[in-house]
Amino acid sequence: MKASEYLKQLQRLDVAIKQKKDELEMLRAAMTSTGSLDYGEEKVTGGSIAGEAKFTKLCDKVIDLETEIQNEVGEYFDKKHRVINQIQSIDKTIYRELLYKRYVEFKKLDSISDEMHYSYGHIRNIHRRALKDFECKILKDITQNDI
């Protein structure tokens, strides 16, 4: 596995969590919406069993999704902590700073070049060397099971 692929796992997890939170928001909205009323049907006393079943299914989905999100958030913070420690173990300060900004803060190289006061081309070269250094020093010790 390449260093950039390994380091991008945080961003992939972050996006997945955000998408699931959006889905959770939509489910909650569906639970609280009244839907449309059909005045053409006969009035039934005693409540709507079909409506209650639908609400119960939505509640179950919300609970399951909340649990799934909590598990992924825990996994995200565990991986984030591990990646930060791995980045901090790199010898060159400029490599550590660049890798942290790119793969933990999810910043683009052009904004990193502005922040660090280097040209974009120079940052690209430093990024390439930093990834190679990370790959040689960190990823060589990591097995597929650790990823």
Image: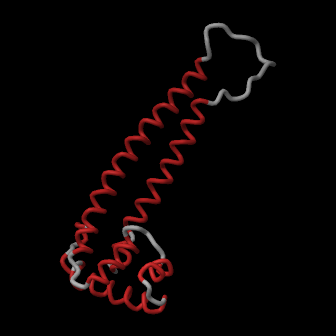
Q: Quadrant of residue 117?
A: bottom left
Q: Residue at x 66, y 27 (%)?
A: 34
Q: Quadrant of residue 8?
A: bottom left
Q: Residue at x 42, y 65 (%)?
A: 11
For the residue pair 94 and 12, the one nearer the viewer reads as: 94
Q: Quadrant of residue 5?
A: bottom left
Give the image location of residue 111, x and y in percent: 49, 77
For the residue pair 146 and 116, the one nearer the viewer reads as: 116
Extreme-right residue of the structure: 40
Give the image location of residue 115, x and y in percent: 44, 78
Q: Residue at x 50, y 81 (%)?
A: 110
Question: Is 81 placed left or right of 10 in the picture?
Answer: left
Give the image location of residue 77, x and y in percent: 31, 56
Extreme-left residue of the structure: 141
Assign the C terminus to one quadrant of the image: bottom left
Question: Is 55 placed left or right of 124 in the picture?
Answer: right
